[in-house]
Amino acid sequence: MIDAVQSLVTRLLALLGIDPRWLAWATPVSLLTLLATVVLLPLLVARLPQDYFYREHRPAQPHSGHWLLRYSLLILKNLLGAVLLVAGLAMLVLPGPGVVTVLAAFALLTLPGKYRLERWLVSRPRVRAAISLMREKAGQPPLHLP
């Protein structure tokens, strides 16, 4: 039975043009991403200011530090976001939390209209309920949502 499953997976991966050895690397990365998501997401949601999504536009951040450091960190953040985006798209067909990883990638990427998309997502009833539950478990007041 195991040989039949292994043969089927190998043929399916060959059909998709994926080297089976790559799957041995992608699976632990997918599991680590899942674990990091489960641990970090509630912490990040609990740290959000109560009025984070309430404003129409995100308030401007004051520039601090040297411009070279600021732009270097911005480039690193976007590179990490791009890597997560590629990994998340791969995880849509491989084992792992593909959708969550793609969302984490979008959170890191600097994109026009991102805040408007974030506000639209958190206004969805299921997302709103999940965020409220995470904040309640962390002992934080609920977010003021649009």
Image (tube, grey):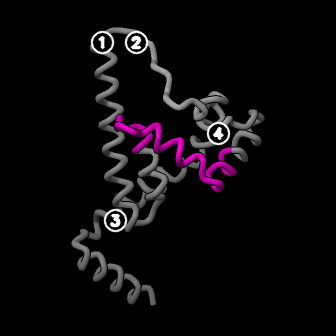
Rendered image: mark on residue 9: none
The residue at 45%/49% (across/down) is 103
Q: Nearer the viewer, mark 3 or mark 1?
A: 1
Q: Nearer the viewer, mark 2 or mark 3?
A: 2
The residue at 37%/68% (across/down) is 93
Real-space CA distance between mark 3 and mark 1, rounded to the nearest whole angstrom: 41 Å
Q: Main secondary structure of the magenta part?
A: helix
Mark 2: amino acid: His
Q: Is residue 98 left or right of residue 66?
A: right
The residue at 39%/39% (across/down) is 113
Viewer-closest of 88 and 2: 88
Q: Is residue 139 magenta?
A: no
Asked whether disc 1 touches disc 4, contact meaning CB atoms under 8 Å apart, the reply is no
Mark 4: amino acid: Leu
Q: Secondary structure at mark 4?
A: loop
Q: Is residue 119 magenta?
A: yes
Real-space CA distance between mark 1 and mark 2, rounded to the nearest whole angstrom: 8 Å
Rendered image: mark on residue 23: 3
Which quadrant: the C terminus? top right
Q: Which residue is mark 4?
A: 145
Q: Which residues are magenta?
A: 106-131
Looking at marks 1 and 4 on the same chain, the residue that comes earlier in the sequence is marked by: 1
Rendered image: mark on residue 67: 1
Q: Secondary structure at mark 2?
A: loop
The residue at 37%/47% (across/down) is 84
